[in-house]
Amino acid sequence: MKCRILHESRGRMRVHFLQARMTPEQADLAQAWLEKQKAVSKARADERTGNAIIWYCPDERKQVLALLASFDYDQAVELTAVQAHSTRALTRSYEDRMFFHIARRGITRFLFPLPLRTVITAAKAVPFIVKALRSLLSGKIDVSVLDAASITVAMLRGEFNTAGSVMFLLGIGEIMEEWTHKKSVEDLAAAMSLNVEHVWVRTADGQEILTGIDRVREQDVIVVRTGNMIPLDGVVQEGDGMVNQASITGEPLPVHKRAGSMIYAGTVMEEGELAIAVRQESGSGRYDRIVKMIEESEKLKSSTEDKASHLADSLVPWTLGASALTWLLSGNAARAAAILMVDFSCALKLSMPLAVLSAMREAGTYHISVKGGRFLENCCEAKTIVFDKTGTLTCASPSVCGVETFEGEDEDEMLRLAACLEEHYPHSMANAVVREAQARNLEHEERHSTVEYIVAHGIASSIDGKKVCIGSYHFIFEDEKTVIPEEEREHFESLPDEYSHLYMSIDGRLAAVILIEDPLKAEASEIVKKLHFLGIDRVVMMTGDSERTARAVAKMVGVDDYYSEVLPEEKAAFIRKEHDQGRKVMMVGDGVNDSPALSESDCGIAINSGAAIAREIADITISEDDLHALVVLKELSDALMDRIHGNYRSIIAFNSFLMLMGALGVLPSATTALLHNASTLAFSLNSMTNLLSGK
């Protein structure tokens, strides 16, 4: 691609693509492609100017120029398929629509003669009147009736400019509401879209190879196991499993899948293992289904929004009644018309959803993904927060500090075997084992048969005809009845307490214990204090780890209570107990074992580096890097509810004032219409501003 450098400073370059016209799709593609390059730290493309701004390491200027010279749209499509969706085209279409709406009003108002303006106003009023008649015929008295009544009365009084202004402002409000809602939905859908980079592909000879998702093609066979997200559409070739399809259908109960069943990208394996013949390559189908699901979902509405919407409709008859009463008492049609020009519905129905959707977008700037407004409301009202320990309060990247072997087993061989099993089920501890094997240059090709994952316990498989298990103390010694050799008892008892232990057995005998260092996140204790300050009065830690480890961590973090050696169902049972006491609960976790509690809570929060099923079930996801996102989330939800309640009071007060002034004859109908619609826009625009701009 030929480009011209327009401006350049150290580490920053603005270039112009030498092409006749750049489409929004090409701008998306160019920006996504540039951001995937190692030499580029950030990029931004603008289709209207055909320019791109590139931020890069100053030492890599020559490489950036070489990249620009080699750029090709067709080649970039293959490399950026997963990032093919953005709101750029949507934004441009609504900007154009708003511009032409305003331009048409200006041309009609100032260039057309009065008779022609009158005809145009009357013609534009027809859809409003038809909509109102349909509402009346269906037994409803809603805002459409009020809009039509105010427009009709204005025209009957000969105030065609007033009627035109009312319809113009209603049009702006409609465009703004539709624009903001669609953009928020698409932003949310993008946040919920797949973030899978590698998949297990089964070769013709039965081997499983970890492959980049962009290399997978139709009819390739991929293998998906418990806890993992299904990255591509396809048909089950073999296997048996339970699949959570909530992201597609909205139904929380898992669906049984067997050979011949259709599988959809973005769903999650709750239990079992499936070999899937791929039907659609990466980037196909999933995004559109998510958009449709969100648009149909009531999750976007909080109960406060619902109350405001119902109140707005219920106030319409009162507005009509006040107008009729004013006319009967005063005999002055102008005063009655002044009341008709004012209603509560427009501002309430427009500003409330905009406030929620804007807050959801703002949350995204802090790397917080929120799936619906009601979860922000629940976050504001929650009084209890439950933390999982591993990967949540502790660092998401624990490390292996040693491997203790028993009965003469080789240390490297035990670590190789552990990594071979653990790589199939990514979790913070499993990842630590795999990383340690890589650091020691231990290759661990597939040697085992079918792997079975037991949620919150461990993994079992068969190698060379021997049963191999790896997991928690409960799984290895209580469930699997593993034996500790008598001569190794002293060795076992002397294992250091400061580390978490991952136990491995072979044929029912203890073979190795992997020592995991799981340091506490530096900000954990500070976050607990801040959450207390923000109104959370009970902070609880729940972990499957031992009492000894749990007690030490709880003391360092400063939680109000802790529970050790808990199973997934016990976490969910605790939340139900809190509900019985009338308390709303937030749950923060990252593993498959946290999924029941995340689903049970009023506001389930998953760490974005955690298990796919945890992210899918959770209502909110936050970054693994910093728990301060929880404080931001709480502050944002509190500020949102303050704004909603403030808007509610202000809208009721201001519009009531306008009605009173109209009824007393202080303000004419044209003025009340102008002030009402101007206030609606003002409340709506204010609702779209950032809540935490001072942070």
Image: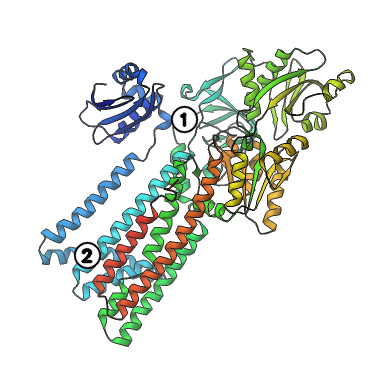
To which quarter of the image does residue 260 belong? top right
Q: Is residue 254 visible?
A: no
Report the coloring of the rendering.
rainbow
What residue do we see at 49% from left, 29% from top? 279
- Image spot of residue 540 (x, y percent): 68, 46
Q: Residues within 10 Å of mark 2 (few under 14, many from 20)?
A: many
Q: Nearer the viewer, residue 570 or 151?
A: 570
Amino acid residing under circle 1? Gln
Q: Is residue 426 left or right of residue 359?
A: right
- Image spot of residue 80 (x, y percent): 40, 27
Q: Is residue 273 above or below residue 449?
A: below
Amino acid residing under circle 2? Gly
Q: Is residue 420 above or below residue 374?
A: above
What residue do we see at 65% from left, 16% from top? 446
Q: Residues within 10 Å of mark 1 (few under 14, many from 20)?
A: some
Q: Earlier in the sequence, mark 1 or mark 2?
A: 2
1 vs 2, front mark: 2
- Image spot of residue 544 (x, y percent): 73, 37
Q: Nearer the viewer, residue 368 or 298?
A: 368
Mark 1 vs mark 2, CA separation in Å: 51 Å
Q: Nearer the viewer, residue 368 or 533?
A: 533
Q: Is residue 21 left or right of residue 529?
A: left
Find disc 2 in the rendering and name its residue.
Answer: 164
Q: Is residue 654 left or right of residue 500?
A: left
Find disc 1 in the rendering and name its residue.
Answer: 280
How many numbered circles does the render carry? 2
Q: Secondary structure at mark 2?
A: helix
